[in-house]
Amino acid sequence: MNKIPFVTKEQIAEIAKTYPTPFHIYDEKGIRENARRMKQAFSWNPGFREYFAVKATPNPFILKVLQEEGCGVDCSSLTELMMSDACGFLGTDIMFSSNVTPEEDFRLAKKLGAYINLDDFTHIDFLEKVAGLPETICCRYNPGGKFQIANKIMDNPGDAKYGFTKEQIIEGFRILKEKGVKEFGLHAFLASNTTNNEYYPELARILFELAVELKEKTGVHIKFVNLSGGVGIAYRPEETPSDIMVIGQGVKKAFEEVLVPAGMGDVSIFTELGRFMLAPYGMLITKAVHEKHTYKEYIGVDACAANLMRPAMYGAYHHITVLGKENAPCDHKYDVTGGLCENNDKFAIDRMLPKIDIGDYLAIHDAGAHGFAMGYNYNGKLRSAELLLREDGSVQLIRRAETPADYFATFDFSGLFDKK
Ligand SMILES: *Cc1c(COP(=O)(O)O)cnc(C)c1O
């Protein structure tokens, strides 16, 4: 099994004449087809909607493509709300799932008419005080302990900072109902980047059972259950990817077994996927600019961890294709490195690749989510451009590369230069 880049060496060589490497490039066709599969997988639920997690790929052009496919957006900060508003997402097209939330963020979310997802019991009073309570409200649940699927520990909710405890959510719904809230949502996020097709169905069952209990104990009407993010992708070519059709059917089964018998078959299913919606449809394109032969063999590239942080931060695997050498034997062992003054600035360690020559283009796969978005300016490195490969084969600049002027924009040099 191999990963096939959605661009060829010839295409990249042509694109690089206008937009020099490094850059992130996204595949509009892939994004749309995947969004349609997602919708199809949950078409059994009339109210279903995917709220794309903006933090994964916060680019208005990407948000527009997803909007055309019927998605809403999931925001967690003021600027994400502003971007979504500017893109024409209206009212309940927006989910606001934040934590440690500043007053002004809640005010804007309320003003826009977004669904507000409260992370904590104390946020009930806080939101009421700073913005007033909306008619519909969602609360984030944290079951504590360990989250297991078939005896395998998936994650440790008991150590996670997010969500209400069981007792808090029951009490919280009672209080919110007394204060006049009419409709309710339930949310939880219990495991990240999991390709296990049982994750969403297990999570759904936990939330559905809680929804039934909440309805019985507090008499509220549950309008939606938000399964949040966490559906993963196969970063390694040998991994089995998530099967969204199987996942959709698994959630349906839990829905029919738990909610329907409780007379709650009108509940809408929402999701807030980021990685699953975008990661495979974006690549970081970089050029080999140096080679170094010391105790190991190094290839130095013109991108660095500031353009894609996941390998440096989590030791995450990102597959690499040397463009134009797709069928060459992988008979060279390299560390592929960026130029930060940090030894963890390596896109690959001891990776078997075809022989790389200076000037070769490397496609770093699955960088479409949590890629550009996690970029930073350490070592004075500048953020790259983002390009969109349109369905007709044309290339659109959807964010220009930073220039030194951008880097210096937040300084005031006036006093400094006066002294000279
Ligand atoms: C990060 C996040 C998401 C998206 O997660 P993915 O793993 O990219 O699917 C969704 N909801 C919330 C609240 C998040 O914090």
Image: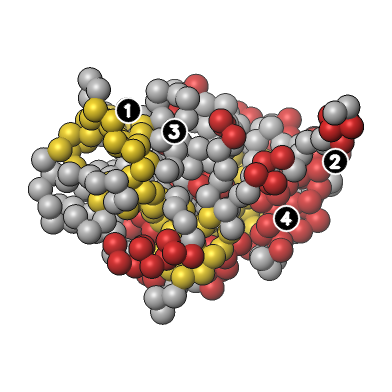
Give the secondary structure at mark 3: loop
Look at discs 3 and 4 and give the one toward the viewer.
Answer: 3
CB atoms at circles 4 and 2 under 8 Å apart?
no
Residue type highlighted by circle 2: Val
Task: State how far apart marks 3 and 2 are (Cα).
Answer: 46 Å
Give the secondary structure at mark 1: strand
Residue type highlighted by circle 1: Ile
Task: State how far apart marks 1 and 4 are (Cα).
Answer: 38 Å
Does mark 1 have its CB less than 8 Å from ligand 1? Answer: no
- Left or right: 64 as drawn, with respect to 245: right
Q: Residue at x 17, y 44 (%)?
A: 355
Residue type highlighted by circle 4: Met
Asked where in the image residue 280 lies, by quadrant, the reply is bottom left
Does residue 199 sit above or below 363 in this rendering?
A: above
Badge 1: how crowded within 10 Å, few (<14), some, or many (20+)?
A: few
Task: State how far apart marks 4 and 2 are (Cα).
Answer: 18 Å
The foreground one among 159 and 336 is 336
CB atoms at circles 3 and 2 under 8 Å apart?
no
Q: Which numbered circle lies on residue 82? A: 4
Q: Residue at x 11, y 40 (%)?
A: 331
Earlier along the polypeptide chain: callout 3 or callout 2?
2
Q: Which numbered circle lies on residue 339? A: 3
Q: Which residue bears the numbered disc 1?
A: 153
Q: Which residue bears the numbered disc 2?
A: 130
Does mark 3 have its CB less than 8 Å from ligand 1? Answer: no
Earlier along the polypeptide chain: callout 3 or callout 1?
1
Q: Where residue 397 sits: x, y (%)?
A: 54, 65
CB atoms at circles 3 and 4 under 8 Å apart?
no
Q: Is residue 89 in sight in this rendering?
A: yes
The foreground one among 36 and 289 is 289
Badge 4: how crowded within 10 Å, few (<14), some, or many (20+)?
A: some
